[in-house]
Amino acid sequence: MHDTHGNVWEWCNDWHAPLPISEITDPTGPATGTYRILRGGSFLTDDLSARSFDRTHLRTPDLRYEGIGFRLAKTK
């Protein structure tokens, strides 16, 4: 992910699951789940959360909160 530091938490397509202990590049996560991943921190969080690898999770993407957004992405 690029330039995701501290503007708003960004919704990710991944479902929440514990991260493996070993290092993995671009893990996909489980196919289904209860919680969706948010990454990057927001202007409402402390500076330790304003990192692309910082993540949290919420139950539903229809929640409205001023510190959450999304990023449009295009694949080739």
Image (cartoon, rainbow, N blue to C red):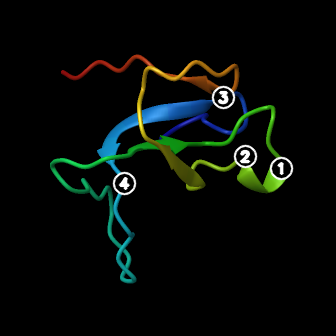
Give how far apart the Cα atoms at labels 1 and 4 are.
Answer: 23 Å
Name the residue carrying label 2: 50
Labelled disc at residue 73:
none
Residue 4 screen position, x and y as percent? 60, 36
Q: In this rendered view, identify the residue nearer to me: 44 or 40.
A: 44
Q: Is residue 10 toward the left or the right of residue 65 in the image?
A: left
Q: CA distance from mark 4 to mark 2?
A: 19 Å
Q: CA distance from mark 1 to mark 3?
A: 12 Å
Q: Amino acid at mark 3?
A: Val
Instruction: Give the mark nearer the N terminus: 1 vs 3.
Output: 3
**Tag 2, which secondary structure?**
loop
Taking depth in this image into account, of 47 and 33 the one nearest to the observer is 33
Q: Which residue is mark 4?
A: 16
Does 65 sit left or right of 58 as displayed? right
SS for callout 3:
loop
User: From mark 2 to mark 1, how far is it between C-alphas?
Assistant: 5 Å
Residue at image mark 1: 47
* Residue type for callout 4: His
The three-letter code of the residue at mark 1 reads Asp
Identify the residue at image location x=42%, y=26%.
61
Query: Do callouts 4 and 3 mark residues in contact (Cβ within 8 Å)?
Result: no
* SS of the residue under disc 1: helix
N-terminal-most mark, 4 or 3: 3
Q: Are marks 1 and 3 in contact (CB under 8 Å)?
A: no
- Residue 76: x and y in percent read 18, 21
Q: Dot 3 corresponds to which residue?
A: 8
Location of residue 25 in the rendering, given as x and y in whole percent from the top left corner? 33, 63
Q: CA distance from mark 4 to mark 3?
A: 19 Å
